[in-house]
Image (cartoon, rainbow, N blue to C red):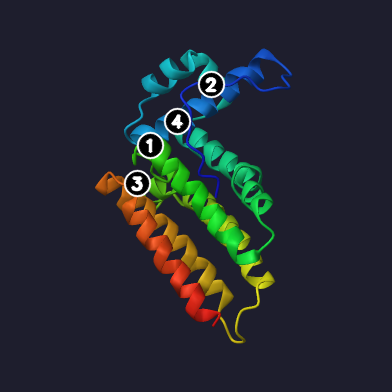
Amino acid sequence: MANVVPTSKVKKPILVQSTGSVTRQRLIESARYLFWERGFAGTSMADLLAHAKVNSGSFYHFFDSKEALLREVLESYLVALHPMIVEPAYSATTKPIERIFAILEGYRERIVMTDAQYGCPLGRLALEIDPENRPAHKLIAENFRGWIDAVRDCLQAAKLPAGTDIEALATYVLATMEGGVMLSRSYGSVDPFDRTVKALREHFRLLMK
């Protein structure tokens, strides 16, 4: 799950095939930022067009609807998961369990960087998007699945006690991260996130005694 802090500054891709591809990318980047800042429902088409600096004709050239753009945003998070979240954490340490905490540290940095205003964009969309919008929820679940898989790979490389339910433990780590991020945003402080991570570390200590 690539929970990067979306930026309001649209960056030009390094490799550009056409003006159309630049416009399409601007729309995606604007949607990522606005859906994170205001939510999907709170972002109007006028907001998207103004932020991306495009007209409605250009929008509908690339996307059938705001829902179609949402799906593209969710696909972009899937693509960014490993290069933006997993690989930096893996490069920080070779110890499997510490790699998990390096991933969590990345989220802590985002909380601090935004003065505790950071909220997981996928978590927000998961709560906001209508449950009947199955295409969007399928992509959100795939993002969560990718995050869980990355943690599960670390757990499989660690020397955990026989019989440990690795799938459940990886899901528990995700729930810890999502809950900690949500509480920190509500409290306006990184302290709740730190407390949840501290409890998770104690859980691992007791598990591996």
Q: Earlier in the sequence, mark 2 or mark 3?
A: 2
Q: CA distance from mark 3 to mark 4?
A: 16 Å
Quickly name the residue at label 1. Answer: 40
Q: Point out the tag, 4 or 1, that comes first from the N-terminus.
A: 4
Residue designated by label 4: 33
Read off the residue under disc 3: 128
Mark 1 neighbour density, 10 Å: few (under 14) some (14–19) many (20 or more) = some
| Circle 2 SS class | loop
In the displayed structure, 155 sits above or below 57; it is below
Residues under labels 2 and 3: Cα distance? 25 Å
Counting other residues with Cα less than 10 Å from the Cα at mark 3, is it few (<14), some (14-19), or many (20 or more)? few
Q: Locate residue 127 relative to residue 102 in the image: left or right.
A: left
The amino acid type of the residue labelled 3 equals Glu
**Residue 10, numbered label:** 2
Q: Nearer the viewer, residue 144 or 150?
A: 150
Residue found at x 62% / y 70%: 155
Residue 55 appears left or right of 194: right
Name the front one of labels 3 and 4. 4
Q: CA distance from mark 2 to mark 4?
A: 9 Å
- The reply to whether dot 3 and dot 4 touch (C-beta < 8 Å) is no
Query: Residue sitting at 27 percent across and 44 percent down?
Result: 188
What distance separates the C-alpha of mark 4 from that of mark 1? 10 Å
Are discs 2 and 1 less than 8 Å apart at CB? no
Q: Is residue 129 above or below residue 173?
A: above
SS state under label 3: helix
Q: Residue 195: x, y in percent?
A: 35, 60
- Toward which corner of the image does residue 40 lie, by quadrant? top left
> Disc 3 or 4, which lies upstream in sequence?
4
Which comes before the other along the chain, label 2 or label 4? 2
Q: Position of residue 78 (x, y in %)?
A: 60, 46
Mark 2 or mark 1: whose residue is earlier in sequence? 2
Question: Between tags 4 and 1, which lies in front?
Answer: 4
